[in-house]
Image: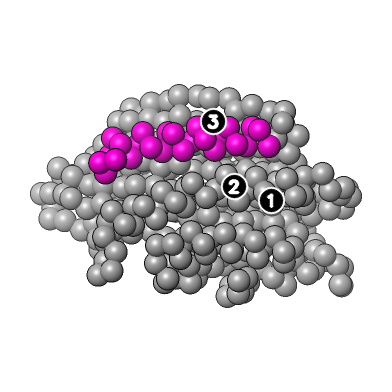
Amino acid sequence: MEINKENIAEWLKTLQDSICSALETEDGLAKFKEENWTREEGGGGRSRVIQNGNVIEKGGVMFSAVSGKTPDFLFKEKEHSVSNQTQQESTFFATGVSIVIHPQSPLVPIIHMNIRYFEMSNGVKWLGGGIDLTPHYIVDEDAQFFHKELKLVCDKHHASYYPKFKTWADDYFFINHRKETRGIGGIFFDRLNKNEEMSFEQNFAFWQDVGKAFSSIYVKLMNKNKTKLYTQEQKQWQLLRRGRYVEFNLVYDKGTKFGLETNGRVESILMSLPANASWLYDFKTTEGSEEQNTLTKLKKGINWV
């Protein structure tokens, strides 16, 4: 396909369709509710939310394509800097698909994916995205599977991409005030355009493959863990870990900040938050417990492959 903003937006809508279909099939009960919305300054989106399923407690697969006057805060970034006159006239276009799934079971991990495209009227354009996994209980076998699948996607395009983008994810998905990672990371990339070794078209193909990898990876993890029995204590731990997820998204997440600062649709932006979460004062794990084992692995730099 010709790579332009219209075709990119249409491709993302098709991706949204395929992912929703795969998740509905694996859940077996709940269906996505669709809501179309428009943004006063330009553009809009197609929000799809699924709730109270067999496997998924709450999740969203969101598409948006928004445009308008370029927000002032973007000009503070080096790659977006322009003259004062151009700044007054500059417009932007941004489109993407963003996914967060919060499962019923504490033994099924939370997953997040986002792929996005951004361009400005001065010719600046770039791709961004990533996938990361947040298990309530870290199981080495599942973490290894997840990272091996992402490495396969990356290695297909460039040998440096997996180690580079894994490190970026470790650094990005870090809850600094807790001194722990949000989960086991994954890959994260931003401002991807072209470089000495990769054209924009080649990076666009990589970006597409990241989006297409989501369904097969998460459906396998859902299927493997969804029927396992769990205790009330494990459910309480799930709520505590969800609390950490909330903290990251509201304090550090760039996508959340961008959406709120560009007058995005609040319901769609905050879709990433779970239906229920918990904070207990000075909670301590038991020595040698699965909970303590999980905490020891919430750190940067673990080699899962």
Instruction: Give the vertical position of 288 relative to 282 (above or below).
Output: below
Q: Nearer the viewer, residue 214 or 292?
A: 214
Colour logic: one colour
Q: What residue type is labelled 3?
A: Arg
Q: Give the range drawn in magenta.
A: 1-26
Residue 139 visible in the current orientation: yes
Residue 243 position, x and y percent, is 68, 52
Residue 65 visible in the current orientation: no
Q: How far apart are marks 2 and 1 (CA)?
A: 9 Å
**Residue at horizontal 78 percent and vertical 69 percent from the top:** 293
Q: Say whether residue 161 is left or right of residue 219.
A: left
Q: What residue type is labelled 1?
A: Leu
| Residue that numbered label 2 is attached to | 216
Q: How far apart are marks 2 and 3 (CA)?
A: 19 Å
| Residue that numbered label 1 is attached to | 221
Q: Residues within 10 Å of mark 1 (few under 14, many from 20)?
A: some
Q: Which of 118 and 212 is in front in this view?
A: 212
Q: Nearer the viewer, residue 187 or 286?
A: 187
Rendered image: mark on residue 48? 3
Rendered image: mark on residue 108? none
Q: How crowded is mark 3: few (under 14 residues within 10 Å), some or many (20 or more)?
A: many
Is residue 12 a member of the stretch shown in magenta?
yes
Residue 126 position, x and y percent, is 30, 53
**Residue at horizontal 27 percent and vertical 56 percent from the top:** 200
Q: Name the front one of labels 3 and 1.
A: 1
Secondary structure of the residue carrying tag 2 is helix
Q: What residue type is labelled 2?
A: Ser
**Residue at horizontal 54 percent and vertical 43 percent from the top:** 99
Decide which of tag 3 and tag 1 comes sooner along the chain: 3
Q: Say whether residue 122 is left or right of residue 47.
A: left
Decide which of tag 2 and tag 3 comes sooner along the chain: 3
Magenta region, mostly helix, strand or loop?
helix
